[in-house]
Image: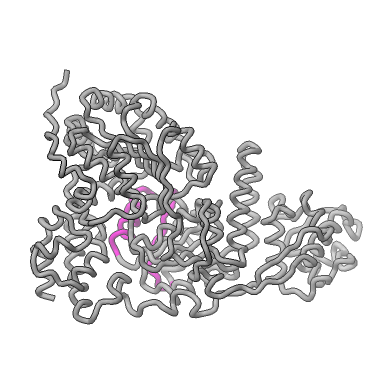
């Protein structure tokens, strides 16, 4: 039998108090929201399912219990994490605060992996991060069983738990095998965490991870610092460029696109316009992706243009905007992606353009997919909820939170609250459009067989344009020719977008020809009212520009006086040097908010510095004297 070095001896009870651990290790005096209840429950050996928004402090909910249980002599916590980059950042951040953590993934050499396993098996490791496929590997399970026999397996944390659900927005088959943790290690507490889960996804997580006996913790899904803005797509590139230049010049952001090709083209175009933009998608070489991600995390003012392959677990706190050039699949995806903005709690913006083509494409992806009808039905419902959010006349935040079962009131900080949209009754226009499509199918015209047509031709007929195609098919003789001449093309596209969104129309075939659905009959009869928002761009000054700080001062430092600003700038320069030396993102060393408090309070001793939020014992020891030197020089 292999002999392992003895694990550290248990420490006095005072050192295992969660609040004492929070202050000593992480430098914070109080837990936020549900954190304390979650930590106490898991540290005490209970199972938990935690729903907490991005930036809400999910990591502390398993890191503090892991430290508490390790100090009590209960060994190693295993964290299931889906991404190598996330593991690296988490372990780097824990190392900075003096917590012995490691990861096992393909980035390690054979010798490095063996060293991590030795540390794990000795019980000296506090947290081990690994992907689900590694955790459920037979050899790894055998190591866990050996740890359990010696009482050195403290807990399992399953991060991004929505990945286990077929109803979720990021299903990963490897997560399904995690049921083995409950089956083989029923006495080891488990905590599953996610930022997004509607009722279907939540039930799926509980069933597939066998968490029926777990305590459910649901934090508020509200991120009040994020402003939600959704505009109709006109010229998406020009709209994006205007948004970045008017609102977020020189600031970090993420731009999401639906395809790899569009990512590459958009990134190249932004670079040509003078924006520091980088592409990221699964079709790129792994080294290039890693290099781009590192630049985004370590440099200021970089805009990442990406598919949804980028973002899960990205902890960069100062992302000031997330923009969507294409419609996401559902509200969970939208919420998860927009939640990567403003993790530091400072003002940030979620901005999206969408149009008729987006609605058509998302509908088609569901309808033409290989999934069963029940799955498609639920996915259509999810899409319809997102479209209702996009078309909403009232508060975006109220709509968003109600999707997750949370009641709220008008926020005063979304585009609809700040600049209430005008609406118009489009019921009669909808009837005209549906009637015209019906006549295409009833009358071929000029000897042609009846057929369906696409949006452009339909609009020409409705608006009375005698194009060659209209004349060819004799559609200028239809009773619906010219009946919509009083409406603009933008208004008609809004009508058609709503009809597709509500399922009264569907697009068929390669050319997106429009067909009536069974529910169109009720609209034609006038039984279904159609009320639309007037097409418009946000009024300048209605978004963050009107209240945004001037210059490039981070939001955390915006209220500092001139001398404190100088001290803050000196601290940032020092932090950048330390981050480069340690090969870490700057925020892992200290967040802007911590540097701003140092600059404001100007502590003159290590004791005074220890009371600054975010300065734990290890960081005080490692950096304290240097910080005091920088402050005095500043």
Tell me if 514 is positioned left or right of 245 in this view. right
Q: Quadrant of the C terminus?
A: bottom left
At a point 40% along the width and 61% down the height, the residue shown is: 341
Magenta residues span: 273-299
List the single residue furthest toward the top: 1
Residue 342 horizontal/vertical position (percent): 38, 63
Along the line of sight, which residue is nearer the eye, 517 or 289?
A: 517
Vertical order, 606 against 148 (above or below): below
Residue 247 horizontal/vertical position (percent): 43, 74
Tell me if 566 is positioned left or right of 221 in this view. left
Indicate how the structure is coloured in the image: one colour
Vertical order, 493 against 551 (above or below): above
Residue 204 horizontal/vertical position (percent): 50, 37
Tell me if 445 is positioned left or right of 129 in this view. right
Residue 108 within the magenta-colored segment of the rendering: no
* Residue 379 seen by the camera: yes
Q: Quadrant of the N terminus?
A: top left
* Residue 115 seen by the camera: no
Q: Quadrant of residue 71?
A: top left
Tell me if 560 is positioned left or right of 9 in this view. right
- Count the labels in the image: 0
Residue 280 within the magenta-colored segment of the rendering: yes
Along the line of sight, which residue is nearer the eye, 401 or 243?
A: 401
Along the line of sight, which residue is nearer the eye, 560 or 310?
A: 560
Residue 420 horizontal/vertical position (percent): 59, 73
At a point 29% along the width and 76% down the height, the residue shown is: 559
At a point 12% along the width and 60% down the height, the residue shown is: 623
Q: Quadrant of residue 103?
A: top left
Along the line of sight, which residue is nearer the eye, 605 or 36?
A: 36
């Amino acid at each position: 039998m292999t002999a392992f070095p003895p694990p550290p001896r248990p420490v006095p009870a005072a050192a295992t108090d969660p609040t004492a651990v929070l202050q000593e290790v992480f430098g914070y005096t109080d837990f936020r929201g549900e954190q304390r209840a979650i930590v106490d429950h898991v540290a005490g050996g209970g199972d938990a399912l935690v729903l907490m928004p991005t930036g809400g402090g999910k990591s502390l909910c398993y890191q503090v219990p892991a430290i508490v249980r390790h100090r009590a002599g209960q060994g190693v916590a295993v964290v299931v994490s889906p991404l190598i980059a996330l593991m690296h950042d988490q372990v780097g951040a824990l190392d900075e605060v003096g917590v012995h953590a490691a990861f096992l993934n393909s980035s390690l050499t054979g010798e490095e992996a063996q060293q991590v396993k030795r540390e794990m098996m000795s019980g000296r490791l506090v947290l081990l991060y690994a992907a689900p496929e590694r955790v459920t590997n037979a050899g790894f399970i055998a190591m866990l069983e050996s740890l359990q026999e010696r009482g050195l397996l403290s807990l399992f944390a399953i991060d991004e738990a929505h990945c286990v659900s077929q109803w979720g927005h990021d299903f990963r088959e490897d997560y399904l095998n995690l049921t083995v943790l409950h089956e083989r290690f029923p006495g080891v507490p488990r905590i599953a965490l996610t930022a997004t889960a509607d009722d279907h996804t939540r039930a799926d997580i509980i069933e597939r991870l066998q968490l029926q006996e777990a305590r459910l913790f649901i934090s508020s899904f509200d991120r009040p610092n994020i402003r939600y803005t959704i505009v109709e797509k006109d010229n998406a590139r020009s709209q994006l460029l205007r948004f970045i230049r008017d609102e977020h010049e020189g600031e970090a952001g993420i731009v999401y696109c639906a395809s790899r090709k569009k990512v590459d083209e958009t990134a190249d175009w932004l670079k040509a316009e003078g924006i520091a933009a980088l592409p990221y998608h699964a079709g790129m070489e792994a080294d290039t992706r890693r290099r781009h991600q590192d630049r985004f995390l370590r440099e200021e003012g970089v805009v990442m243009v990406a598919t949804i392959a980028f973002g899960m677990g990205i902890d960069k706190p100062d992302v000031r905007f997330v923009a969507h050039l294409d419609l996401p699949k559902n509200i969970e995806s939208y919420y998860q992606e927009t939640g990567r903005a403003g993790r530091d709690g400072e003002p940030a913006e979620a901005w999206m353009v969408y149009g008729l083509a987006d609605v058509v494409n998302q509908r088609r992806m569901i309808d033409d997919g290989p999934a069963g009808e029940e799955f498609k039905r639920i996915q259509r419902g999810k899409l319809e909820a997102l479209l209702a959010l996009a078309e909403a006349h009232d508060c975006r935040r109220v709509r968003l939170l109600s999707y997750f079962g949370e009641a709220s009131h008008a926020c005063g900080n979304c585009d609809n609250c700040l600049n209430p949209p005008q609406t118009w009754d489009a019921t009669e226009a909808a009837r005209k459009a549906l009637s015209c499509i019906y006549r295409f199918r009833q009358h071929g015209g000029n000897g042609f067989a009846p057929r369906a047509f696409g949006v452009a031709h339909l609009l020409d007929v409705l608006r009375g344009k005698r194009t060659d195609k209209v004349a060819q098919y004799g559609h200028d003789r239809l009773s619906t020719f010219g009946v919509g001449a009083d409406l603009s093309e933008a208004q008609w596209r809004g009508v058609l977008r709503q009809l597709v969104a509500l399922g009264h129309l569907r697009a068929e075939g390669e050319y997106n020809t429009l067909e009536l659905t069974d529910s169109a009959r009720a609209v034609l009869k006038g039984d279904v009212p159609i009320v639309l928002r007037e097409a418009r761009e946000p009024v300048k000054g209605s978004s963050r520009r009107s209240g945004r700080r001037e210059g490039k001062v981070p939001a955390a430092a915006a209220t500092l006086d001139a001398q404190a600003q100088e001290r803050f700038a000196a601290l940032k320069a020092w932090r950048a040097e330390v981050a480069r030396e340690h090969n870490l993102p700057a925020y892992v060393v200290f967040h802007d908010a911590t540097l701003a408090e140092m600059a404001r309070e100007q502590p003159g001793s290590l004791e005074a510095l220890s009371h600054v939020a975010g300065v734990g014992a290890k960081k005080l020891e490692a950096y304290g004297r240097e910080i005091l030197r920088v402050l005095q020089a500043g």
